[in-house]
Image (tube, coloured by chain):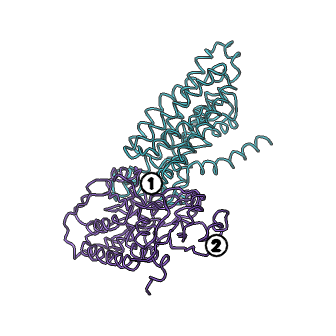
Chain colours: A cyan, B purple
């Protein structure tokens, strides 16, 4: 039984990354100060920094990382395509259209939740649109049709964003670009709590589908012969994975690389049994995004490096090394 | 505020954000809470009684302080410059990366004015933060207030706002007398500029705010108003907002007498490169050498530099009226 040990090890890695993430930031605090601040003692500025800024942000990084990795692993299984990623059904493009439109129309200032809500609505709308197009054009859940519909809708959304930006005031333009770069700077307790409540059932559902995903990745016919309710599993898995991604995008913008590569890393290391792959990818995604966000916050402090830039700079060399080692 | 009028100011800074984010290599101005010198403002606050001060800011919100602020961070370069001009520099405890005045160079940087590191800001324990209020207000105010920081939102958009903010900042920093006398002096200096160009022919002017796309300043902006005061007729369209885009075809058709090119660390295309491009080459002003390069930091910051900015424009447009 190596699987429980592996998951335990990854869990420890997430915990370590979480501690590091709370320990480090733009402002230099000693370990002692951080420990005091967590308990609400000491300098009120340090307490606010640790409890109101670093903690919710670290938890949000872990949640987003887990959601993206789980969603990516699910799409790769469903589409039997190694290039599948969480945004494959146009979710990121739809979210960006929602967020950018809300920003350019000046709704962003009404309340902190307006942009995330608009992004979420755009993401879900895009997902439904892609599924609908695929259903009209070909057989609803056919892999080829879905992939092409997703790509085409994504391209169309990009054009929409550019069109909106041409007519944006310079300020709204800046805010929109900033949103599209993605990042966790807006993390707060209410948002993080909401995200956790929302993600938990989705993640549980994907874990419950792990065995069915194993069978599906052998091919639809084989899975059906072996007694899997193919259609129901596919619809459920597409829907849940996209809804997880939509929430992650709404919280932090589209952060690349995590959902695409983290599942591959787990597969290269430990094979593709989804009963291990899914939970392992979630934990690794959480730890990876925690570390990336810590670097994003500290490398150029007080400026922040866009999170997607860090995930790529850290992830790509590691992944290439892993690929080469496996190939040799 | 029915017509949003704005300066490229604090926002030109914002547009440089992307580049800055990507280029920012080293950590500037790390600081530890508690590492600051104890309340430097207290020693010089003798002139100010600790009475509550209240202003209404440009978000229409009442800002009330139990006493004049002693630990201020201005996220607007124009706010920083105004506080320095009021002699309240010792009350500043941080700066943005766009504040280049040597008097604040020693202060820790909190990053950009529109995307500050909130963590670094909190560590400075400010009792007042000035934020930029644009046409599309940012969520920054809400965020800072939820963390218990007093915030005043300022939208320096035209010349009248300069004097309004001078008076407000005078009150917030307990430097009202200084604000009064500085306001009087700046008004007198502007009057002198206006008088020096009275009766002179008004050259038509293209003021280049940005080149990609080509943008100029509308008549309701700080720059547009100063151009009028300095005896110029801007070719900016009057009905197309504050920062109208121009096509080069329009410019070639209008043939402005003078082209003004603000240059600075965050703005501007190198004049030689710009003026060699097709279209630009065809302008009479370019061929005849009537292109004046101006300091963007002076013109794009609607603060106490207003009179110097007006004089710089006047000297560029009416050299004969410039008195040494």
* Residue at the image point whose x is 64% and y is 47% from the top: A315
Q: Is residue B163 above or below residue B137?
A: below
Horizontal arrangement in the rendering, residue B220 relative to residue B40 (left or right) = right
Q: Nearer the viewer, residue A6 or B84?
A: B84
Earlier residue among tags 2 and 1: 1
Name the residue rendered at 47%, 42% in the picture. A60
Report the residue marked by disc 1: B239
Judged left or right of residue B123, residue A267 is right
Residue A92 vs B64, above or below: the answer is above
Q: Secondary structure at mark 1?
A: loop
Badge 2 density bin: few <14, some 14–19, many ≥20, Cα 10 Å: few
Residue A117 point in image, percent of width and height:
44, 37
Q: Residue furthest bottom?
A: B324
Q: Which mark is residue B152?
A: none
Q: Is residue A28 visible?
A: no
Secondary element type, mark 2: helix
Please report, as a chain letter, where disc 1 is located: B
Q: Position of residue A168 (x, y in %)?
A: 50, 49
* Residue at figure coordinates x 48%, y 56% from the top left: A25
Alpha carbon distance from label 2 to label 1: 30 Å
Q: Which residue is tagged 2?
A: B287
Side of A322 where A68 appears, left or right: left
Q: Are marks 2 and 1 in contact (CB under 8 Å)?
A: no
The answer, for residue B151, to whether it is visible in the render is yes
Nearest the eye: B225 or A78: B225
Which image quadrant: the C terminus of chain B?
bottom left
Q: Position of residue B133 (x, y in %)?
A: 38, 56
């Amino acid at each position: 039984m190596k699987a429980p040990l592996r998951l335990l090890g990854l869990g420890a890695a997430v915990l370590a990354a979480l501690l590091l993430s709370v320990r480090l930031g733009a402002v230099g605090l000693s370990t002692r100060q951080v420990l005091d601040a967590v308990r609400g003692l000491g300098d009120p500025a340090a307490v606010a920094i640790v409890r109101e800024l670093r903690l919710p942000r670290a938890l949000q990084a872990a949640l987003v990382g887990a959601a993206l990795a789980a969603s990516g692993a699910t799409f790769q299984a469903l589409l039997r395509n190694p290039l599948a990623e969480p945004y494959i059904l146009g979710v990121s493009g739809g979210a960006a259209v929602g967020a950018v439109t809300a920003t350019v129309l000046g709704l962003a200032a009404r309340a902190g939740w307006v942009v995330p809500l608009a992004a979420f609505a755009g993401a879900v709308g895009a997902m439904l649109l892609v599924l609908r197009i695929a259903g009209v054009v070909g057989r609803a859940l056919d892999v080829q049709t879905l992939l092409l519909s997703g790509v085409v809708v994504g391209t169309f959304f990009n054009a929409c964003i550019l069109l909106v930006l041409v007519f944006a005031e310079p300020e709204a333009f800046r805010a929109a670009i900033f949103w599209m770069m993605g990042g966790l700077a807006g993390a707060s307790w209410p948002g993080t709590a909401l995200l956790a409540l929302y993600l938990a059932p989705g993640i549980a559902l994907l874990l419950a589908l792990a065995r069915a995903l194993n069978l599906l990745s052998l091919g639809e016919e084989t899975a059906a012969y072996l007694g899997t309710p193919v259609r129901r599993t596919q619809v459920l898995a597409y829907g849940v994975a996209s809804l997880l991604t939509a929430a992650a995008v709404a919280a932090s913008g589209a952060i690349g690389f995590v959902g695409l590569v983290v599942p591959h890393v787990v597969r290269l290391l430990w094979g593709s049994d989804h009963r291990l792959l899914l939970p392992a990818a979630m934990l690794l995604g959480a730890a990876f995004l925690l570390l990336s966000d810590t670097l994003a916050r500290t490398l150029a402090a007080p400026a922040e490096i866009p999170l997607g830039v860090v995930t790529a700079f850290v992830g790509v060399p590691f992944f290439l090394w892993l690929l080469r080692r496996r190939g040799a | 505020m029915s017509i949003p009028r704005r300066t490229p100011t604090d926002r030109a800074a914002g547009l440089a954000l992307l580049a800055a984010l990507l280029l920012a290599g080293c950590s500037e101005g790390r600081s530890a809470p508690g590492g600051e010198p104890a309340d430097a403002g207290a020693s010089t606050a003798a002139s100010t009684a600790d009475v509550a001060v209240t202003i209404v800011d440009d978000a229409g919100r009442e800002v009330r302080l139990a006493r004049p602020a002693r630990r201020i961070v201005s996220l607007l370069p124009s706010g920083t410059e105004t506080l320095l001009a009021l002699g309240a520099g010792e009350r500043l405890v941080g700066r943005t990366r766009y504040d280049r005045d040597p008097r604040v160079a020693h202060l820790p940087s909190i990053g950009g004015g529109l995307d500050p590191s909130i963590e670094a800001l909190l560590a400075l324990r400010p009792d007042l933060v000035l934020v930029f209020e644009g046409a599309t207000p940012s969520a920054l105010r809400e965020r800072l207030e939820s963390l218990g920081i007093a915030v005043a939102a300022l939208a320096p958009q035209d010349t009248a706002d300069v004097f309004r903010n001078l008076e407000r900042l005078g009150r917030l920093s307990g430097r009202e007398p200084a604000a009064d006398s500085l306001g009087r002096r700046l008004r007198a200096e502007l009057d002198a500029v206006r008088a020096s160009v009275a009766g002179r022919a008004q050259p038509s002017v293209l003021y280049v705010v940005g080149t990609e796309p080509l943008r100029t300043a509308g008549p309701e902006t700080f720059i547009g108003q100063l151009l009028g005061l300095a005896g110029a007729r801007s070719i900016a369209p009057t009905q197309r907002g504050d920062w109208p885009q121009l096509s080069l075809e329009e410019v070639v058709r209008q043939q402005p007498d003078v082209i003004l090119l603000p240059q600075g660390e965050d703005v501007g295309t190198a004049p030689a490169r710009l003026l060699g491009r097709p279209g630009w080459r065809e302008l009479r002003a370019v061929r005849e050498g009537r292109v004046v390069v101006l300091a963007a930091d002076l013109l794009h910051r609607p603060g106490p530099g207003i009179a110097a900015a007006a004089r710089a424009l006047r000297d560029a447009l009416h050299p004969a009226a410039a008195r040494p």
